[in-house]
């Protein structure tokens, strides 16, 4: 009975917003809530440097099929979190039955607002650029 309720809820919640990159990419990013504005700006910063990333803005839970399809269509997906425990990433792993190695955590949890520079630097580092430690030294 509860599974039927969740399946019905998936058809009633707001759909996720998908933002395709300007060029084909195997990387995606998932974001939501107060990280939205900074993430849109970070996508522009990344594209300027040739780092193209498809994006998905979550708007509701339970996750709709498009969220599962987005994750499945990318080799690596960065999940932007402002939560100490990375709860959204954990929910995505559990609810979408995703290999945890596929979802890379971009966590900002220091009491200050998340910035586009922070997001773009973390994604660059996780994509294989400078180490996260090197990036932190530059951005504070």
Image: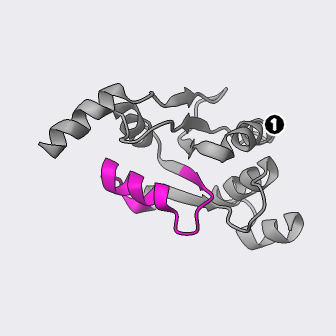
- Image spot of residue 92 (x, y percent): 40, 51
Residue beneath disc 1: 48
Q: Up-down: is 60 above or below 125?
A: above
Q: Is residue 96 magenta?
A: yes
Q: Up-down: is 24 above or below 86?
A: above
Q: How is the image coloured?
A: one colour
Left or right: 50 in relation to 78: right
Quadrant where the C terminus is found in the figure: bottom right
**Pointer 1 local density, CA inside 10 Å: few below 14, some 14–19, many at least 20:** few
The residue at 17%/43% (across/down) is 3
* Residue sitting at the far left: 1
Magenta region: which residues? 78-100
Quadrant where the N terminus is found in the figure: top left
- Image spot of residue 23 (x, y percent): 64, 28
Q: Is residue 27 magenta?
A: no
The residue at 47%/42% (across/down) is 74
Q: Up-down: is 133 above or below 72?
A: below
The residue at 40%/42% (across/down) is 61
- Image spot of residue 85 (x, y percent): 52, 68
- Image spot of residue 21 (x, y percent): 63, 30
Quadrant of res 12: top left
The residue at 78%/61% (across/down) is 112
């Amino acid at each position: 009975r509860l599974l039927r309720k969740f399946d019905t809820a998936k058809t009633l919640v707001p759909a996720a917003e998908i933002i395709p990159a300007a060029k084909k990419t195997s990387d995606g990013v998932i974001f939501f809530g107060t990280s939205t504005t900074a993430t849109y700006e970070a996508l522009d910063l990344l594209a300027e440097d040739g780092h193209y990333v498809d994006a998905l803005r979550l708007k509701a839970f339970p996750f709709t099929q498009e969220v599962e399809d987005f994750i499945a269509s990318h080799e690596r997906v960065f999940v932007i979190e402002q939560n100490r425990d990375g709860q959204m990433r954990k929910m995505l792993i559990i609810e979408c039955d995703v290999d945890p190695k596929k979802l890379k955590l971009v966590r900002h949890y220091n009491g200050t607002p998340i910035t586009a520079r922070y997001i773009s630097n973390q994604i660059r580092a996780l994509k294989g650029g400078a180490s996260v430690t090197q990036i932190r030294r530059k951005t504070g």
